[in-house]
Amino acid sequence: MADEFPFEISPMFEGERIRKDGMYAELAGPKSKGFELVRAADMDDVEDGKFTLIGPDISDMEEGSRHPLAMIYKIAGELVEADLESIVERRNHEFQNYIQGFMHLNQRDDVWMRVSKEAVEKGLTSFESVAKAIMMLFKNELPFIEKVEAIYITDMDEIEKEIDNAREVYKARDDRTRDLHDEDVDTFYGCTLCASFAPTNVCVVTPDRISLCGAINWFDGRAAAKVDPEGPQFAIPKGDVIDEESGEYTGVNEAAERLSSGEYDRIKLHSFFEYPHTSCGCFEVVGFYIPEVDGIGWIDRDFAGTAPNGLQFSTMAGQTGGGKQVVGFLGVGVNYFRSPKFIQSDGGWNRVVWMPKMLKDKVLNDIPEDIRDKIATEEDATDVDSLRTFLKEKDHPILERWVEEEEEAPEEEEEAETAPQAQGGFTAPQMMQMPSNMPSMPMMSGGGSGGVKVILKNAKVSIDKVIIKKQD
Ligand code: SF4
């Protein structure tokens, strides 16, 4: 059946990246608009296999151009229910990446696709073939879907009309978990969809912790596990509570060991520093520790600037992803900011010092009122010096930690007299103490005066031989 398509379809193309010079057209993404949405419908309301395109097709697009793209799928079947919509929507990401020469990133109204020049040369000139391939995969892989219909939109005016509706649907899904908490259930849900590129990833979805991709909440996990218990979403019995504050459970630890093939055997669901949740690469936001102020910053995909640590989202995402438990960095879904258990074992919101303005505005009502104005954005602080000044001016609760740590570190003050200048222009005692299990950040100085200072972060240096010679 796959012969009818002008491209190959296989999971082996999942990791394919289409760079700018190999790109024929860019669809949606940060410089345009788009979304993906799956809706459950009655059997009579879905014309199986039907495809509708509103706006120009790939063949109408110029090489190197950018266009908006929305993808709406209507699904029906005896077992189809609204709770399954997110699960099917997430598979759109997976299945579009099965298409050779087609790349799909992110989710919901953050989607970003590219079609390659090579694929267009081979005949991928119509969205119809893409949509038909996806509909075929939906029905093959998700047998509860009996009928499916696709509507793709590339006309900006039409997308503008539909996007608010899509956002309402996402919001309604997210709001469902607000009154349900980890302590109210005895089963969490796991997902292995990202295992193909992040083999040790352990994705655990609980009522108080939405998936990192932001697309799957506890209800979605439950619905998926019910219709297809052998599928990529499955139940994780919670087991016994080891520590409620940090969110450590025997069932999650057992699942972590099994899913990561022994790489990890502990996960604390609401901890930033100690045994944090693994980060695959689909996360919507990355949290990063800022040692100079002992606080945590968050940066999202939509923010193109640099954080006060001088790094952009893409750099930190590279550091964080791959299914690893990276102490000092943490990938999360935006909705986790709305969780009452948000990094609660590390101080919750009182530990947050910086966020891009757009992200902060998005979750503003969920930030406790007493700290709302004390969290800096790019408008208040662009580096660690200005961040430190801002936090002092606003009397951010993080200042209490500075006092405690400065009181605890008299020996370091003595050492500082001879120590080289540390990162961010602070001397060693001004740097806050790193949590004990942070990866070390060795510093190499180019010498006492002048020269170049090289800072190696998270580096392991191995030395075969050291020869020490007396200098005449
Ligand atoms: S981030 Fe987690 S829930 Fe989302 S697709 Fe990946 S494994 Fe599944």
Image: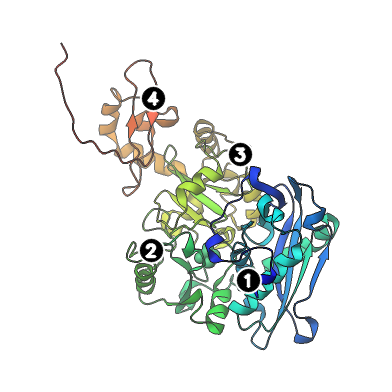
* Beta carbon at label 3 within 8 Å of ligand 1: no
Please name the residue that numbered disc 2 is placed on: 267
Q: Vertical placement of 96 versus 284: above or below?
A: below
Q: What element carries label 1?
A: helix
Q: What element carries label 2?
A: loop
Color theme of the render: rainbow
Label disc, if present, on residue 86 of the rendered structure: 1
Number of marks drawn: 4
* Up/down of 334 relative to 149, above or below: above
* Ligand 1 contact, mark 2 (Cβ < 8 Å): no
Can residue 211 be seen in the rendering of this structure?
Answer: no
What's under tag 4, amino acid-wise?
A: Lys
Question: Which residue is under mark 3?
Answer: 305
Q: How crowded is mark 3: few (under 14 residues within 10 Å), some or many (20 or more)?
A: some
Mark 3 / mark 1, whichever is N-terminal: 1
Give residue 190's position: percent from left, percent from top.
47, 72
Which numbered disc covers residue 453?
4
